[in-house]
Amino acid sequence: MKALLIIDVQNDFLPGGALAVPDGDQIIPVINRLQESFDFIVATQDWHPANHGSFAANHKNKNPGESVNLSGIEQILWPIHCVQDTLGAEFHPELKRKKWKAVFQKGTNPYVDSYSGFFDNQRLQDTGLGDYLKGQGIDTVYVAGLATDYCVKFTVLDALSEGFNTYLIEDATKGVNLSPNDSERAITEMSKAGSEVIKSSSIII
Ligand code: VGL
Ligand code: ZN
């Protein structure tokens, strides 16, 4: 059975937000249409405590875009974003949520970031998403949301490693592009790892 995974379509990742993905809002109507074609829909939510180690503001003399070593691995620093219980962490109000079965929150541990919906960046903590999907009979996942070059990419790669047939819906995702071609490179990487890359028009009837 198939599921749609909607990754981090939250105010802070949309135009006007703290870590706005350029044109991120353009995928909202696409995702809303896509939802009509799925019976099983799960979303993820970036959900950081205010002292999170991925925030540049929590390191001395560091700016967003620079890196630090966080608990032993390289961490890109971001503006303060998706702080728990703030407006920026909420899903965009136009995003339909009626059919969602569950929301998996991630990035709650201040000492390790979590781009993927399945595991943190150290692969130490499991969000439970993989077992949940398998327990519901899901063997195929379609991935949409933000951002192509971070949370979507890591979610797709982990979905593949967890054994799911994995489809990236290319026009239902947008990237941060800290470097100009990051999204393109991310899509190539997901494809090489075994993900199918498709357009929403191949699903929407
Ligand atoms: C994300 C950077 C930091 C994402 C989350 O959702 O792609 N990117 N936190
Ligand atoms: Zn984050």
Image: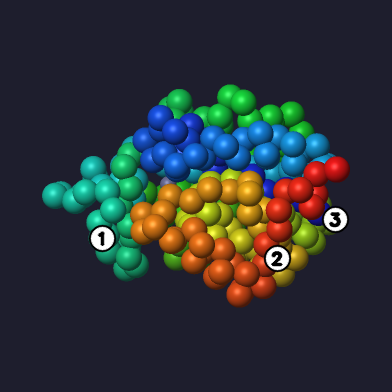
- Taking the spot 67% from the left edge, 48% from the top edge, the residue there is 5
The residue type indicated by label 3 comes to Met
Question: Is residue 140 visible in the rendered structure shown here?
Answer: yes
Query: x%, y% of residue 146?
Result: 53, 46
* Contact check, label 1 and label 3, Cβ < 8 Å: no
* Contact check, label 1 and label 2, Cβ < 8 Å: no
Would residue 8 be found to the left or right of residue 30 on screen?
left
- Residue 109 is marked as none
The residue tagged 1 is 68
Q: Considering only vertical position in the picture, is 161 above or below 119?
A: below
- Point out the frontmost of discs 2 and 3: 2
Question: Is residue 125 visible in the rendered structure shown here?
Answer: no
- Taking the spot 80% from the left edge, 37% from the top edge, the residue there is 36
Instruction: Tell me the SS state at disc 1.
Output: strand
Query: x%, y% of residue 191?
Result: 62, 69
Instruction: Tell me the SS state at disc 2.
Output: strand
| Circle nearer the N terminus (1, 3) | 3
Would residue 122 be found to the left or right of residue 193 on screen?
left
The residue type indicated by label 1 comes to Val
| Circle nearer the N terminus (1, 2) | 1
Q: Residues within 10 Å of mark 3 (few under 14, many from 20)?
A: few
Instruction: Tell me the SS state at disc 3.
Output: loop
Q: Quadrant of residue 166?
A: bottom right
Q: Is mark 2 within 8 Å of ligand 1?
A: no
The residue tagged 2 is 196
Foreground of the two, 60 or 16: 16
The residue tagged 3 is 1
Foreground of the two, 17 or 80: 17
